[in-house]
């Protein structure tokens, strides 16, 4: 049975099927259903750098991926064992010798309680973005990220079938799923393969050769109960994707 908090949020899924066009991202992460303990905070630093990225912007006036450093500071608070609130501020980019303020985001994440110890876990994250035009061409926008996963012994299999929808009355909703298969070497170390894609408009999804396709090799390290790190190297699978992207995620809870 779905948790009552999730049931109340399901109707919101249909709100996203309207408009969107996905831009670069400050956050390269597959959501695994784990949240901050109620009454506690967590700060996450998201960083990614494209040493060999796309040389053309996704749309006129957009940020060029090549040699850009993108990131954000995410602060999350545990409201309940099934509900977490978060804010991303600032979202920023360093590119061509300049610093850019890209915008900010608010999110609300609902999950099955104690997802880390469930064989099957699920949830949904709602993220509202307010970004400058060089970063996102359809601001404000709403991202809806369902979370579906399995813990099978030392293996984790996770799917985030993301829908991104602009709220300014133009464009179409886009489909940008991500997946993760991880092997937990120990309680402190894990290795994973992650896949990120963007198929464009749901009304007319792009084929594999013309859609954004990136595969990452990832390593996770949990220092202690409060601190963890994730590093990954991503490789484009076609000419419409960045050839090489590096990501670093640093978490601290208190």
Image (spheres, rainbow, N blue to C red):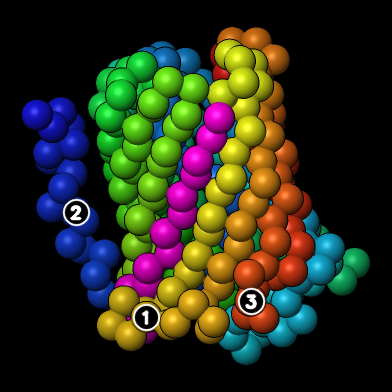
Q: Residue at x 76, y 62 (%)?
A: 244
Distance CA(mark 3)–CA(mark 1): 16 Å
Q: Position of residue 100 (x, y in %)?
A: 74, 63
| Mark 2 in CB contact with mark 1 (< 8 angstroms) | no
Q: Position of residue 11 (x, y in %)?
A: 13, 52
Q: Residue at x 18, y 44 (%)?
A: 9
Looking at the rendered image, the quarter that the N terminus falls into is: top left
Count residues near mark 1 (Cα–Cα under 10 Å), then give few for <14, some for 14-19, many for 20+.
Answer: some
Label 3 or label 1, whichever comes before in sequence order:
1
* Residue at image mark 3: 238
Residue 69 in the figure: left or right of residue 148 = right
In depth, the one of 218 and 75 nearer the eye is 218
| Mark 3 in CB contact with mark 1 (< 8 angstroms) | no
Residue 71 seen in the figure: no
Q: Position of residue 99 (x, y in %)?
A: 80, 61
Q: Is residue 171 magenta?
A: yes
Q: Is residue 175 magenta?
A: yes
Magenta span of residues: 169-183
Give SS at disc 2.
Answer: helix
Q: Residue at x 30, y 24 (%)?
A: 119
Foreground tag (3 vs 1): 3
Residue 47 in the figure: left or right of residue 79 = right
* Residue at image mark 1: 205
Label 2 or label 1, whichever comes before in sequence order:
2
Q: How many marks?
A: 3
* Residue at image mark 2: 12
Q: Residue at x 54, y 82 (%)?
A: 209
Disc number at residue 58? Answer: none
Q: Is residue 184 above or below residue 163?
A: above
In depth, the one of 192 and 178 nearer the eye is 192
Residue found at the very far top of the displayed protein? 225
């Amino acid at each position: 049975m779905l948790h009552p908090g999730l049931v109340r949020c399901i109707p919101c899924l249909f709100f996203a099927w309207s408009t969107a066009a996905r831009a670069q991202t400050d956050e390269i992460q597959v959501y695994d259903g784990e949240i901050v303990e109620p009454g506690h905070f967590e700060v996450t630093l998201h960083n990614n750098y494209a040493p060999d990225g796309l040389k053309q912007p996704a749309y006129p006036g957009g940020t060029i991926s090549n040699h850009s450093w993108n990131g954000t500071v995410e602060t999350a608070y545990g409201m309940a064992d099934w509900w977490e609130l978060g804010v991303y501020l600032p979202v920023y980019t360093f590119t061509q010798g300049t610093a850019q303020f890209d915008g900010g985001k608010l999110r609300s994440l609902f999950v099955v309680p104690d997802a880390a110890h469930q064989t099957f876990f699920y949830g949904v994250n709602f993220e509202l973005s307010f970004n400058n035009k060089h970063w996102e061409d359809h601001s404000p926008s709403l991202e809806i990220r369902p979370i579906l996963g399995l813990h099978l012994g030392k293996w984790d299999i996770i799917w985030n079938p993301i829908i991104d929808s602009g709220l300014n009355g133009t464009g179409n909703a886009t489909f940008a799923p991500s997946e993760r298969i991880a092997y937990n070497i120990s309680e402190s170390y894990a290795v994973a393969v992650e896949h990120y894609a963007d198929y464009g408009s749901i009304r007319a999804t792009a084929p594999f050769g013309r859609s954004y396709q990136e595969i990452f090799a990832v390593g996770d390290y949990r220092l202690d109960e409060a601190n963890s790190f994730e590093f990954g190297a991503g490789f484009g699978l076609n000419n419409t994707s960045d050839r090489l992207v590096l990501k670093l995620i640093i978490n601290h809870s208190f």
